[in-house]
Amino acid sequence: MSGTDDPLVVVANQRASGIDGLDQAVAALRKRVETTVVEVAGPGDLEAALAGLTGGTVVAAGGDGTLNMVVQHLWEQGWLHRVVVGLLPLGTGNDLARTVGIPLDASAAATVVLSGRSRPLDLLVDGAGTVAVNAVHGGIGGLVATRAAPLKPLLGRMAYVTEAAWTGARTPGWDVRVEVDGGVLAEGTVLFAGIGNGTTIGGGTVLWPLACPDDGLAEVTVAFAAGIGARLRLAGALRCGDPHRVDGVVMGRGSAVRIDGEAMPYNADGEALVPAPSRTWRVQERALRLRTPMEPAEASAVCEVAP
């Protein structure tokens, strides 16, 4: 199914860094369809904002965290099967938009909401019913997302880069066991364990180069704690989108991922989760319908990484 003439509800996150582009996008939407904008400060505001929703298209205006907030609410209400979700990527990272090819320009993204295709995508869901649309990251990624938040208004996506460099160099790691579909992928002291539905985190850092958000599988990347030289090589590999070429990195894929051991900090789509000694995520196939461009985005080029 492509395009929409249904009325739109735009959920705008007051905290999103690019929210100044909202007026431009909404003006483009209103030229075509009836559009209602509701501003929310957090998940608690969504029940009233979406009360009485029976179908149509709900548009998340913000970053990955805003999209997560909207999808989490629709999942909890059992509405995802009857609602199409649109995205105006007005946040700092906008990583799922990058994966599926939604333009980062507000007006161009509005055109996708109006004329794009309804593409079924997978979700990652843990045992407590917490949803991740783009990725779950445990270890330094969990710390970086939390510590970078106060820097985002000043530094934008460079807040992630700056904090990742500092945290990655100084963190000793966490002792954990990572299982994928019941088999052990990694066991030992790790810097991070990331589960990807999309390909990137932190505004374009490629952690799961082979991820496809509608193939029924999650991509898993685990980096063991090592010396400063290895960590610098890992940072370079991540910048070039080729993490598997670095010693101490293991990658896998499957429909269920379990992490046990020392409680790591986690985040889902950049939003902090409570550290826990055991978590399991499962892929919910084609659970979300997202408005995306009619033609799939081309894969990003990968540069060489020095040995």
Image (cartoon, rainbow, N blue to C red):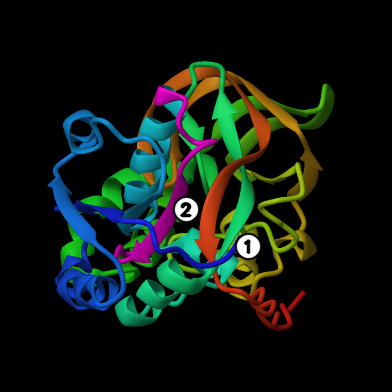
Residue in view at x 33 percent, y 70 percent: 158
Residue 234: numbered disc: 1
Of residues 161 and 70, the one drawn nearer to the viewer in this rendering: 70
Q: Amino acid at mark 1?
A: Leu
Residue 304 point in image, percent of width and height? 73, 82
Vertical comparison of 9 with 157: above or below = above
Which residue is rendered at x = 34% and y = 40% of the image? 69
* Position of the N terminus by quadrant: bottom right
Where does residue 230 sit, x and y in percent of width and height? 65, 59
**In this orientation, does residue 267 appear?**
yes
- Asked if residue 292 lies left or right of residue 8, the reply is right
Query: Mark 2 falls on what kind of element?
Result: helix
Residue 283 coordinates in the image, percent (x, y): 67, 34
Rounded to the nearest angstrom, the CA distance separating label 2 from label 1 is 10 Å
Q: Residue at x 17, y 64 (%)?
A: 153
Judging depth in this view, the residue of 158 and 215 nearest the camera is 215
CB under 8 Å between discs 2 and 1 = yes
Q: Does the magenta segment cover residue 121?
A: no
Tag 1: Cα neighbours inside 10 Å, few (<14), some, or many (≥20)? many
Instruction: Give residue 168's mark.
Output: 2
- SS class of the residue under badge 1? helix
Nearest to the observer: residue 108 or residue 131: 108
What span is colored magenta in the figure?
A: 77-93
| Of callouts 2 and 1, the N-terminal one | 2
Name the residue type under label 2.
Answer: Gly
Residue 119, placed above or below residue 140: below
Where does the C terminus fall, quadrant-wise?
A: bottom right
Is residue 168 left or right of 216 when viewed as pictured? left
Mark 2 closeness class: few <14, some 14–19, many ≥20 residues within 10 Å? many
Residue sitting farthest toward the front: 5
Q: Residue furthest right?
A: 183
